[in-house]
Image: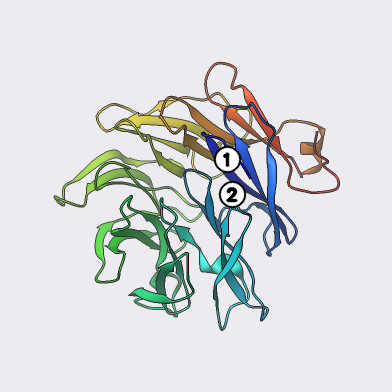
Amino acid sequence: MPIPPAARLIALAFDDITRLWLVDLSGDTAPVNVAVWRAPRSGYANETISTTPDARSAVLGAWGPSGKAALYAYDVASGQTTLLYEDPDTDVPSFLWPTIAPDGRRYAFQTADDVRAGSTNGRSTERVIAHPEPQNVFGVWHPLAWSSDGALLAISRSSEGDSELAIVPGQGGSARVLGKGSLAAWRPDAPLLAVAAGMTLFGGRGLMYTYDAATGVKNDLETPTMWTLAALRWDPTSDKVAFIAAEGGPGSRREIWARSRTGPAMKVSALSGNALDVWWSPVGSVVYALVPREDANAQLGVPSVDVIIIGGSNRRIATLCRGDPRAPCP
């Protein structure tokens, strides 16, 4: 399977079937459905799969040979799938929360007892950190993001109205707690981490800050606001982030924003619907978003989704289908 120079892997689900799409971000070739598997999710299946920025590798959650939740490595070019881990207890793949490193060599996931990591070439795993209170919701860590060199892993734990974010050595060790946070993104070329947390239905406030893992310096980007936040992404070539924010909290429209480390946040989209995801092009010159498609199928509650380039008329470059028979591919 040839992989375009600028590409993105996007997983969409309907009932227990998830489809993985390879999208050519130039728009020169049509999206390709490169994999299909069973997992109990619906909608935008971002909790059961983690993909590399180059769209070459993924770790996905599905059911294993024994019917329990399992993780598989998937190589897009060869189409090869490798069983990495099958949990002895849970049968809910989304519970494992897989997170693949940017170079595709390592992955992390959570179990009932700890956060673990392993190589995508084999099935052995090691403990990264134990959950402080596995019997409580707020006592369970889950992995969020690897640093570009794989040396550090950002982890988070949360309850209805609170969250906490920490970093831990990728090979295991003690957690360095940074403060509130449920989203994290590492800058590709430096040990700088962007952290965000948003309002929830149960309260809290939106905030955003950076943390330099080398110096320990923390700088606020957004002070507590009435924002719900999602999909925090660093520009790969400059010192700014893109993110999804709903200004009025839960229930408000989710739109695309961007900001540098020194300037104010600026809205960069005028969307008619809610943004599902946002990311930068490999050279940082373009912002892409995933949004529900506004067509007749959307009235059925089963919309397809569009990949768009943010700016101007928000040009659509691809339409992806969830597989619902009521919403066939256009």
Report the residue marked by disc 1. 3
Q: Quadrant of residue 128?
A: bottom left
Q: Is residue 192 left or right of residue 275?
A: left
Give the image location of residue 156, x and y in percent.
38, 61
Point out the image quarter for the N terminus: top right
Mark sitting on residue 77 = 2
Residue 212: % across, % down? 21, 47
Give the residue at x 61% y 60%.
Answer: 80
Q: In the orientation shown, which residue stands out farthest toward the left?
A: 215
Q: Quadrant of the C terminus?
A: top right
63 to 325, vertically: above or below = below
Kindly check if marks 2 and 1 are in contact, taking CB atoms under 8 A apart as contact.
Answer: yes
Q: Is residue 266 at all visible to an observer of this figure? A: yes
- Type of the residue with mark 1: Ile
Q: Secondary structure at mark 2?
A: loop
- Secondary structure at numbered mark 1: loop
Report which quarter residue 17 is drawn in: bottom right
Q: Residue 198: which numbered mark, if any?
A: none
Furthest residue in direction top, as rendered: 312
Observer able to see residue 247: no
User: Few, some or many C-alpha atoms within 10 Å of disc 1 (few <14, some 14-19, many ≥20)?
Assistant: some
Task: Indicate the amino acid at tag 2.
Answer: Ala
Q: Look at 38% across and 78% down and name the residue there.
A: 133
Is residue 262 shown left or right of residue 321?
Answer: left
Task: Give coordinates of residue 66: x percent, y percent.
Answer: 66, 81
Of the two numbered discs 2 and 1 on the same chain, state the one appearing first in sequence.
1
Q: Estimate how packed mark 2 is, as few (under 14), some (14 to 19) or many (20 or more) residues with alpha carbons within 10 Å.
A: few
Residue 144 versus residue 249 in the image, above or below: below
